[in-house]
Image: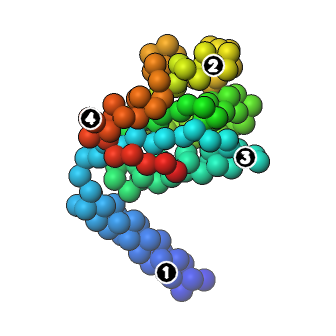
Amino acid sequence: MKKIMTVAMTLAIALVVTSFASVAEASERYTKQKVVYHINYDGGADDKKYRGAMRNIQNHINAVGADNMDIKVVLHGNGLGLLSQAKANEALRGQVLELKGQNVAVHVCNNTLNGRNISYENDLFDVFEEDIVPSGVAELSHLQQQGYTYIKP
């Protein structure tokens, strides 16, 4: 039993050291990043595509560090389904809140709201007036002109 405990402790210590080494390597490798994630597609069955996109963003934050990230998510067209589905999908809602808690900004296209008669207050999860941009595609271009790297997960 003592031998098993020693092996378990050694493995636990090795895991912690490896974890710290990975974080240290990432912080040495990556500097501050400005990124815009573009979502304009349907989430598919069980919101799998939306949840995958949220995981991609979280993985990016994990690799670079929240303090080194300036992330915007631009939603337009079918991409607004992410926040519509988050009202009913607890897992997706949790991912959205987790990212927002790490200062990820979500920008919602006003053209899509108007064109599809969507109420940001009633139909979408956790959207406020300041989250709305005049045009999703214009916002993507605007952010890229400001030096944001474009990613479409």
Mark 1 and mark 3 lie on one chain; the one further toward the N terminus is 1
Q: Provide the residue designation for mark 2.
A: 115
- Indicate the amino acid at tag 3: Gly
Q: Secondary structure at mark 3?
A: loop
Which label's residue is closer to the chain start, 4 or 2?
2
For the residues labelled 4 and 1, the Cα–Cα distance comes to 54 Å
Q: Work out which quarter of the rendered image holds the N terminus and state it.
A: bottom right
Q: Amino acid at mark 2?
A: Gly
Looking at marks 3 and 2 on the same chain, the residue that comes earlier in the sequence is marked by 3
Q: Residue at x 76, y 48 (%)?
A: 45
User: Which residue is disc 4 drawn over?
Assistant: 146
Q: Earlier in the sequence, mark 4 or mark 1?
A: 1
CB contact under 8 Å: marks 4 and 2 = no
Q: Earlier in the sequence, mark 1 or mark 2?
A: 1
Please provide percent x and percent y for residue 47. Answer: 70, 44
Give the mark toward the camera: 3 or 2.
2
